[in-house]
Image (spheres, coloured by chain):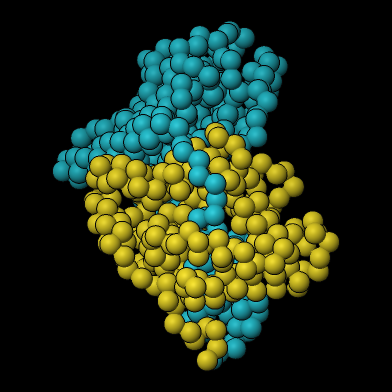
Amino acid sequence: MTQADQPLRLRVTSPADEADRAVLVRLADGELDALEDLYDRYKTMAYSIAYRITNDTTLAEDCVQDAFLGAWRNAGRYIEGRGSVKTWLLAIVHHRAIDAVRRRRPTTELPDVELPPPAALTRPDVWAEVAAGLDAELVQAALADLSEVQREAIELAYFSGLTQQEIAERTATPLGTVKSRMRLGLLAMRRRLDAGPT
Amino acid sequence: MSERDDLGGLTCEEVREFAGAFVLGALEPAEEAAVRAHLAGCDDPHAEIAELGGVLPVLAEGVPVVEPPAALRGRIMAAAAAELEERNAAAASVTASAADAGTARSAVAPVAATTATRADAAPATPPLAFPTATERDARRSRAFAGTWLLRLAAVLAIVALGGWNLVLRNDLQAAQSYEQSVAAVLDVAAQPGSTTAILTPTEGSGAGLAAISATGDVTLAMQDLIPTTGGTVYTAWAIAGDAAPISLGDFKVSTNGIATFQGTGAPSQAGLVLAITQEPNPGNQAPKGPIVSKGVATAAT
């Protein structure tokens, strides 16, 4: 059995997911109360990730605002898709924050502003769900499974918004090695999560 | 398993190699587009994308917890409420137009209140000086050389391009709102003695058109403006000859970047310069902020 053929054990529908979907239905109907509910549920997670990436309170606030308004506008489209609301929202916040830090770096190639919806709005459709309530110990264990160079590559990409090419240049590492570090690092985390608490 | 190389120019094996960088958002735009094109057409479901992407929330779980400021909730809800109001107004206006196509069009859709802030994220723009009398004379001469047909063609091109861009963004409501704004401008432009101006951005965003009636009423339709935040506003100005700019009024812009504005007190004369500035506060009688868009009024007939 290849890694790709293994069952996705994290694809779990939790009560929190069900509650999220109920909120999403109301959101798609344009209910402002639903947006408040969604915000209250995920504001801390959203702001924490936005602040971690931007390291700037104003930018982080803007990213969170954009993300929740984007979710509000696109709930109708997303409702037909798969994946947890939390994962989807997180992807939007992450995309906005990375976009913000890349705009702050004058040497980075900026995305074409006329492109259709941000990639983060569609990408989660092909993601596996990660159930709410991940065990904190398991998260730490998964992160600890990363080698130092894998962690560096993943963090530079995910939290600093660097492309694989930029990571290769910054770390003076061949591009192919950077690719492998990211892929194998994520794979190692995946395996640990699939194995569950020990 | 397919190994077609005509899907985004990538083989399945190459997509698998890219998977980690793809889910982390670490590909160059062209690479990411190629992977997406491949995934859209490939028979292989490429489970590795889901497999690796599903790990990302774990990275987020490891982030130090930081609580957002309490005021952020109010900002988001205010922006959403304003947007909802705008949507409802646009829908009501479309319904009214359909019910009575012969009546005059509703001129102004409510302009939403503050929202998020591409402006804050963007690099600061140095203020542009207002044009000198010589510069205005030169622009006036160039403007008179055009014909009404050319101007109409330009207007239609702006409408078409604007509509195209907005549709690309799947923002039908915004496209309808802009269409209504343009219709309101064209209504004024059709009146005898009116003048029109095509406003072009000075720094890449904020284009539109305006019509000035014989009585000095200004109707303005703008798109691609950076949304206003906090107390900031856009202000429309009329500049006649060497006279000081005359404020025509302030307006705010929501996240859709669309604005319809109506003001009074503009001299209805060819060669009048219309300018939009971004002001730190409403009510300024002299411009303090940078010009974001401007155009020269020419006779509409």
Which residue extends farthest right? A172
Question: Which tint was used for chain B?
Answer: cyan
Q: Is residue A30 above or below residue B126?
A: below
Residue nearer the viewer, B119 or B57: B57
Taking the image as shown, residue B93 lies to the left or right of residue A112, namely left
Q: Is residue B213 visible?
A: no
- Is A17 left or right of A183, judged from the image as shown? left
Q: Could you tell me residue A117's position as x and y percent?
A: 47, 56
Q: In this rendering, does residue A52 appear at all?
A: yes
Residue B73 x, y percent position in the rendering: 38, 35
Q: Residue furthest front?
A: A198
**Total count of labels:** 0
Q: Is residue B238 left or right of residue A75?
A: right
- Residue at screen point 58% across, 8% down: B243
**Is residue B137 toward the left or the right of residue B257 in the image?**
right
The answer to which image quadrant residue A157 occupies is bottom right
Relative to residue A9, is residue B88 depicted above or below?
A: above
Q: Residue drawn at (73%, 68%), measured in percent from left and top?
A: A178
In percent of width and height, residue A91 lies at 48, 57
The image shows residue A155 at horizontal and vertical percentages of 65, 57
**Quarter of the figure with residue A186:** bottom right
Give the camera-side residue of B104 and A134. A134
The residue lying at 55 percent from left, 84 percent from top is A3
Name the residue rendered at 54%, 76% in the picture: A191
**Foreground: B301 or A56?**
A56
Q: Which chain is yellow?
A: A
Q: Is residue B168 above or below residue B112?
A: below
Q: Residue furthest left?
A: B99
Does A78 appear above or below B176?
below
